[in-house]
Amino acid sequence: MTRHMKKVLLLASLIVLSSCSTLIMNQGFKSYKADIVKTKEYKSANHFQQDLLYLNDLCANSFPDIDNVFPRQQRKSVTDSLLNLLSDKGVDKQVFNGYARFYLSHFENQHTNISGLDSKMMFPYILHFVGSKWYLWDINNDYDSLLIGKQVTKLNDKTIEIVEKELSQYVFVENDIDKTNQVRALINRSDLLKQFGIIDQTDSILLSFENGKTIWVKSIYQDKDIHFHLGDKRFVPNPITKYNNYNYNMTLYPEDNYAYFQFNRCFDKVDAYESIHDYVKPWIVPFAKLYLNILIKKKKMPRNNFGFKIDFDRPVFKDYLQLMFDSIQKQGVGNLIIDLRNNGGGSSLLCNQLMYYLTDKEDLKDFSKMYYMSDFNKQVGKKEYNNFIKTYTKKNNSQPEKGKLYPDGFFNCDSLLFEKIENPKSPYYIPKNRKVFKGKVIVLANYQTGSAAALLTTLLQDNNIATVIGTSVGNNPIGATGFQPYKLPNSKETGSVAPNYLIRPEPSKGKIFIPDYWVENSVDDMINGKDEYLEKAIELIQKK
């Protein structure tokens, strides 16, 4: 780059810097140009109908194996009925969001979603589930505290099972426990319960309990009216597994022969720079990196929709891992508990860095990566798309067909699992002489373990590196995955689609992840600071 070009870039950067975050969000993300916008149907539709048509076209041309998940005829039927509903002039953004959620729920995929649902009213109770049963966890002090911990069987005249089934039509889930967890966020929101057809009125609701007790709970509109019995005491932190706000943090317990590693976000300073080009247009990458430079110098990260942040006290994950495993070895600790229950995902490369310290096995199996021949991948990842066609054609003397899944050739080699970790030129590089942990590894994971963290959990289980305690994870280890943001043209609602497809290392273990030991915490456990996951882990350590 010439000196003049650098000056031009710097000047342009300074002009947009004050609103760079907005620029990146509004113009910088790679976007899909849908052919549907050229049609008469689209041009004659109202704004919300256009957004639905765009969303349908986006999903049809990005979601792998779509016809097996959301068959074409069913998709047309759902879309047509929603277009009819959206013809009503009384539809606002909130109603549209609900309809879009109904459409997207058919994909049964956490990464194929939409954000922006708003709620201003609530019933002042909190429910918790264990298995398929729901329990009262807390309630406003206007009501009987003796009902806390009791099983709830009905909301108004509907059984909790029916309520859960009906609400599941508005969430983005991949398995049963994931569904229950996502429904939990809606189950006390009075305005949403009405919007989704669960109740007819928002002023009150009847809770029925297994012991025959019933109570009418009135809706509230303002935070000042919230006076829960338990409040902050609803969840008493376990002294060992209590949540800390670091991306990653290790505590040693040498007297009990274990280390506890809480891994909350798969994100660090290195990945902040390296992942920019995955999501934003090439022309805006320099601006985004300059903006990131200034934020890091100021030790300030803006709030974002993805939950990612840099830990300025320990910004580089691989540096933290080196110190962590050095400490574990010096203390002679033989067991490592990795807690992924708060980890919604991030970079799989950080997960691979951790895994690299957990094993030196040469026969590791990686996920099988499938490439989807789609218009979406052609637009958003043109270089990768053209390379795939070139490689496939050379090998098979024919071109791959649009709309089909294919093994992703060279990228499907198990030996490439640690390619970027072992390459000295890679920013994720870790020297081969790292201090590999030789003891027992136990992973704590549940329905809140998502995306890259869920994939790590599967890799560790399928390669017999770790014992997993908990529940099914948020993302299934076989199916569509990946994160590619979108913004609808009119409502400007945002979300993501899942353009990739993975198959777990041991496909015979099934589409849904099952832990080695199924464990959940009850209401009593949480009120008393008891962590059944940790207790099971310690039991296994002591048995050894």
Image: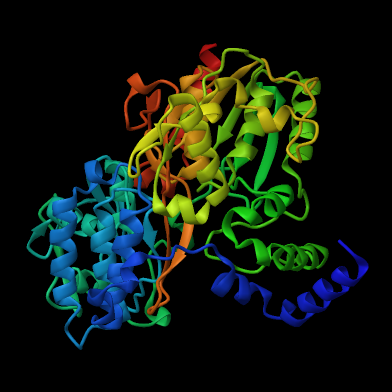
- Of 24 and 315, nearer the camera is 24
The quadrant the N terminus occupies is bottom right
Q: Say which quarter of the image contains residue 281.
A: bottom right
Q: Residue at x 79, y 63 (%)?
A: 293
- Residue 530 screen position, x and y as percent: 46, 40
Please say whether residue 520 is visible from this viewpoint: no
The quadrant the C terminus occupies is top right
- Of 125 and 36, nearer the camera is 36
The colour scheme used to paint the residues is rainbow
Q: Residue furthest front?
A: 397
Q: Is residue 331 above or below residue 145?
A: above
Please say whether residue 508 is visible from this viewpoint: yes
Q: In this view, does 48 lie above or below 148?
A: below
Q: In this view, does 209 lie above or below 509?
A: below
Q: Say which quarter of the image contains residue 436.
A: top right
Q: Residue furthest left?
A: 157
Q: Residue at x 64, y 19 (%)?
A: 359
- Of 2 and 183, nearer the camera is 2
- Residue 422 screen position, x and y as percent: 73, 27
- Residue 393 screen position, x and y as percent: 47, 32
Q: Residue at x 40, y 23 (%)?
A: 516
- Of 76 and 166, nearer the camera is 76
